[in-house]
Amino acid sequence: MNGQNIKKQDYEIEIERLQTTCKTLTSKASLIDDLSKDLEAQSARMSELENLNKLKQEECVQLIKENQLLGERNLNLTNMN
């Protein structure tokens, strides 16, 4: 092999190495994008669940208050009789 062929072969090897590196980085970037989208979706779902939980807690508090009022009314009616 002469010097020119060695340089050409080295050049081709370097191009192949760079192409492999580029494919690897593209794959990793795609994975990061997918994970970011998944994180956004999970965060939105978590926010929805927190809102639902808050509404359920408020509903429970209201039901407890109504139950207490009914209990007081029943007690008053019992005392009247």
Image (cartoon, grey):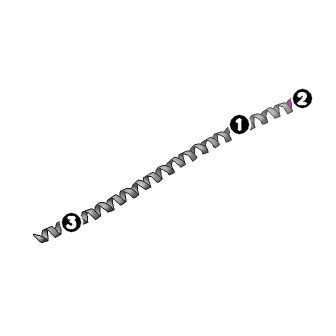
Disc 2/disc 3 C-alpha distance (Å): 102 Å
Check disc 1 and give the amino acid type: Thr
Check disc 2 and give the amino acid type: Asn
Image quarter of residue 10 = top right
Q: Residue at x 51, y 51 (%)?
A: 43
Q: Which residue is mark 2?
A: 2
Residue placed most toward the observer, 59 or 30: 59
Q: Earlier in the sequence, mark 2 or mark 3?
A: 2
Q: Which residue is mark 1?
A: 20
Q: Is residue 77 above or below residue 32?
A: below
Q: Earlier in the sequence, mark 2 or mark 1?
A: 2
Residue placed most toward the observer, 22 or 60: 60
Residue placed most toward the observer, 7 or 21: 21
- Most extreme residue toward the right, as rendered? 3
Q: Which residue is mark 3?
A: 71
Q: Viewed as shown, does residue 70 lie left or right of 57?
A: left
Mark 3, Cα crowd under 10 Å, few <14 / some 14-19 / many 20+, is few
Secondary structure predominantly adopted by residues drawn in magenta: helix
Check disc 3 and give the amino acid type: Gly
Which residues fall within the magenta stretch?
Answer: 1-6
Residue placed most toward the observer, 45 or 32: 45
Q: Are marks 2 and 3 in contact (CB under 8 Å)?
A: no
Q: Earlier in the sequence, mark 3 or mark 1?
A: 1
